[in-house]
Amino acid sequence: MSTPKVKAPAKAKKVRELGAPKGMRDIMGDEYYLFQGFFEKAQEVAMYYGFKPIETPMLEHEDVFTSGIGEGTDIIDKEMYTLRTKGGDHLALRPEHTASLMRSYIENGMNAQPQPLLFYQYGPTFRHDNPQKGRWRQFYQFDLDALGSEKSIVDALVIKTLTTIITESGAPAISVDINSIGCKECRGGYVRELTTYYKKHLNALPALDRERLKTNPLRILDSKEEKTIEINAGAPESVSFLCPGCKKHFKEVLEHLEEMKVSYTINKNLVRGLSYYSRTVFEVVVDMGEDSAPMAIAGGGRYDYLAKQLGSKKDVSAMGAAIGVDRLLMMPWYSKHTPRIMKKPKVYFIQLGFEAKLKSLNVIEILRKGHIPMIQALSKDSLGAQLGMAEKSGAPYTIIFGQKEALDGTVIVRNMNTRSQEIIKHKDLADYMKSLK
């Protein structure tokens, strides 16, 4: 008689420890208000200079970015989050805002409107980058864009608006690194010269940059490899290859910056990391003190050929820039703009007993409609506990709402400095509180 086989117990499924995905985090408490305060300030400056809001989807068809940003860039080759829907669509979480904005411009026929169109937008963007201090896989940008004009004044307008936002956020000393990488008429000659130069140093180039030489030679100028940085010191300068139109445009941009007293340095190796750029490219650099290297916290440039790359029949002249908000907020000089909804409380609301608790929200609504900033602890019952919290809150007045007041339709308003009190009817409460200093 054969021995029956005993089935081995199934292996317990490993339970993944619950947590946010790597490189992503929850934003709450004071950090949330830091973001909100900055976005409000940035919007205020942008609107003053004529920019209007737009919001594009966080998900786009993948080819919006592969066509626009281009192969041979780190974003496309390594960092983009992509997915395939049940219906077979290939989508991507946006790694930046510009391609989405141009897609929207084309799709919504914005070329029929008076040009240029000025937009600002902000929100999360996503790149599968190596998480480190100030760099997240879900990070936040504030973007400025001007579409529909090739004028140099548009470049200056974007740069001025961007630097104003950063300066008014507390930056003590900023400078603009700027370059021109030319247009489609003159860039070809520069790229050929650059390719010839790198071929002479081919054996010294790291493998990553040898690969870039095949796909996108300009990207080598943006390399972070130590050996390549040494080689780049002798690389040809793009400004030496500019056609007359690009020379004139670049000269005018620099004249605008000088007139606005915006400090700048011509950086011959500056190309930015995206293949859609043309003519002006720039970065805003912050002085980090004697012990640290300057840090780029914003940048951008022209992208006059992006529209055609996305399927438009005509080119659309455009200029844009973005601020890396996460990095800016961690700066020791950031001025911590207070969000408009964060108002110093004028009143601490105290309630006592079931009848008062039942009608408390009606009294709070009177204060809300009267725009009287207040705080409360409706879940508390003890008078002592609520008075203690009122003292710590710093609110100059306390409203006490008990059983008697609930029946009479009144409240007690106490001055927390003098301890004087007044009995006020509900109908007079908002006006009375407004009259108090």
Image: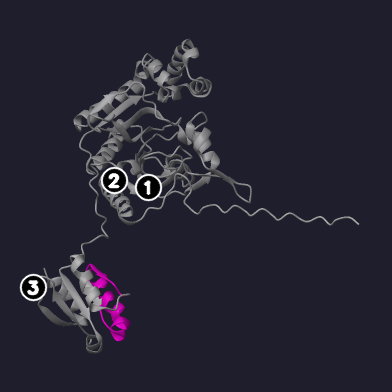
Three-letter code, disc 2: Ala
Relative to 407, is 258 above or below? above
The residue where tag 2 is placed is 46
The residue where tag 1 is placed is 122
The residue where tag 3 is placed is 418
CA–CA distance between discs 2 and 3? 45 Å
Three-letter code, disc 1: Tyr
Based on the displayed image, in which of its 4 quarters is residue 219 positioned?
top left
Which residue is at 29% across, 45% downward?
46
Asked if one can make out residue 312 in the rendered structure from this viewpoint, the answer is no
Q: Secondary structure at mark 3?
A: loop
Front: mark 2 or 1: 1
Three-letter code, disc 3: Thr
Residue 348 x %, y %: 22, 71
Circle 2 packing at 10 Å, graded few (<14), some (14-19), many (20+), is many
The extreme right residue here reads: 1
Which residue is at 29% across, 39% downward?
162
From which residue to which does the magenta span run? 351-378
Front: mark 1 or 3: 3
Residue 189 x %, y %: 44, 16
